[in-house]
Image (cartoon, rainbow, N blue to C red):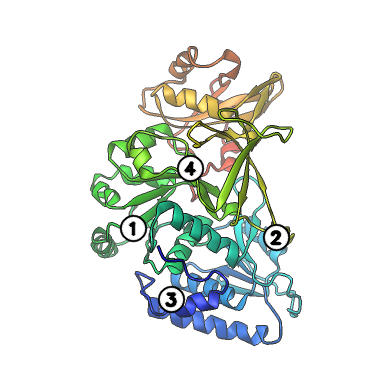
Amino acid sequence: MSNPLSSDSARAVFEESLNFDLLGIDQVRWIELTRGYCDRLNAFTAKNQFPRILISQTDPIEFLAGFMAACITQCPIFLSNPNWSIQEWRQVLESVQPHQVWGTLPILVSHQNSEFADAQAKGWIMIPTGGSSGQIKFAIHTWKTLTASVQGFRSFFRVDAVNSCCVLPLYHVSGLMQYLRSLLTHGRLHIISFVHLYGSESSRMEQATFLHKSNNMPQDFFLSLVPTQLQRLLQQPHRLSWLRSFRTILLGGAPAWPVLLAQANQQQLNLALTYGMTETASQVVALKPQAFLQGRFDGGCVLPHAQVEIYDSAGQPLAAHQTGNIMIKAQSLFQGYYPHYCPKTVFKTDDLGYFDEQSYLHIVGRSSRKIISGGENIFPEEVEAALYSTGLVKDVYVLGLPDSQWGEAVAVLYVPLNLGTKAQQLKDDLDSRLSHYKHPKRWLVADAIPRNAQGKVDLFRLRQMNWSGALI
């Protein structure tokens, strides 16, 4: 395989891309808009001024053009979710204090800074993370860290040009990296709104146009999904042949539940389970489709640009099959959280895992989710796995709620497989699967578990639910 384009210069990459058909949509418009944005920014950079840009574009071509122009001119850019709440927007604007806003915001922006002499943030690319249960943070990346991730991906999956079908938001690392993989390797990129795949919001004509394009898509494309998206597509029989046509379906963003993986395996989907985060510029571990189709539903191999190690609470390395904290070293590591630039050599995650004898990494949970109830340590992932093994639930989430007697009480929100399934059946079935102190004390049934666009559980909404009447 030939080497990817030089990761040293976004400008050189852009100029080189003019000779290739990058976008499955209007590339001419992308080029024109990128040049227009560059002209606007060059007026500042010529005076050694690097304005902070907040981009909130819903149009994908506008977004990618703005992003590319910022990278070319090395102006710091903050990627933002147009659907943030008013409260979240206030927090972001207070933190960022942008000099320029590209796109529309639901609140008025006060431009407090008129001088851009400080070049400290030159070349920074800020990608949002968090927001489901706390403050939104921006992980600082650079052109170098993002392109290192592309090189590791390309080497691991042994492809020359990376062709991507993107249905994920471009402001999210999982969507942005699909663009960069195609850009850097002269691949093709098709950007499709997920509502065109699922839901009634798009018109019949739009759906017909999309289906014509997507059904004729070459079979050498990567598709990236989060678990809830995959679940929705599997519920549509007419989508199955389309899903099977992809060489690889990257699945990440949140843990996938066993029933979902079994369904995907039964349909012979080329699923690649991935593990990564905004701080690592997407995946650093992946399970290749061949292993998944052979019945392996967990674990994955470390990508070439990364190293993963397991340590105990005292910082000592652990042997195979010993569970501990996951530590990541990678060329794609972020450089701190804005505004604190702090280049990382190692990132201590909140995740717990272990390596097996075949060097597959297994994720078993998060240390921050640990529940201490009556003095006992309980890991929600173990309780969730036991509930899934009953075969009576489609989706489940376990958390700890404040309790005057226990300190924390184990609570579960579950979606039954059948409407007739009662909490008492689940409670009885757990007797042979879990120690009694690990059993949930509060049970709440739901039609669906609240999740954000990436499939992660929305903890704020979850805790706001009416648990007072939950079955004890």
Question: Disc 1 to disc 3, how far (Cα)?
Answer: 19 Å
- Disc 4: which residue: 301
Mark 3, secondary structure of its residue: helix
Figure label count = 4
Query: Do the residues bearing badges 2 and 4 touch, measured as CB atoms within 8 Å?
Result: no
- Disc 3: which residue: 17
Q: State whether residue 384 is above or below residue 41.
A: above
Name the kind of residue labelled 1 in the image: Phe
Question: Disc 1 to disc 4, how far (Cα)?
Answer: 21 Å
Mark 1, secondary structure of its residue: strand
Label 3, residues with CA under 10 Å away: few <14, some 14-19, many ≥20? some
- Disc 1: which residue: 221
Query: Do the residues bearing badges 1 and 3 touch, measured as CB atoms within 8 Å?
Result: no
Query: Do the residues bearing badges 1 and 2 touch, measured as CB atoms within 8 Å?
Result: no
What is the x, y in percent for residue 410? 60, 24
The quarter of the picture where the C terminus appears is: top right
First-in-chain label (3 vs 2): 3
Label 4, residues with CA under 10 Å away: few <14, some 14-19, many ≥20? many
Q: Residue at x 56, y 56 (%)?
A: 281
Question: Disc 2 to disc 4, how far (Cα)?
Answer: 31 Å
First-in-chain label (1 vs 2): 1
First-in-chain label (1 vs 3): 3
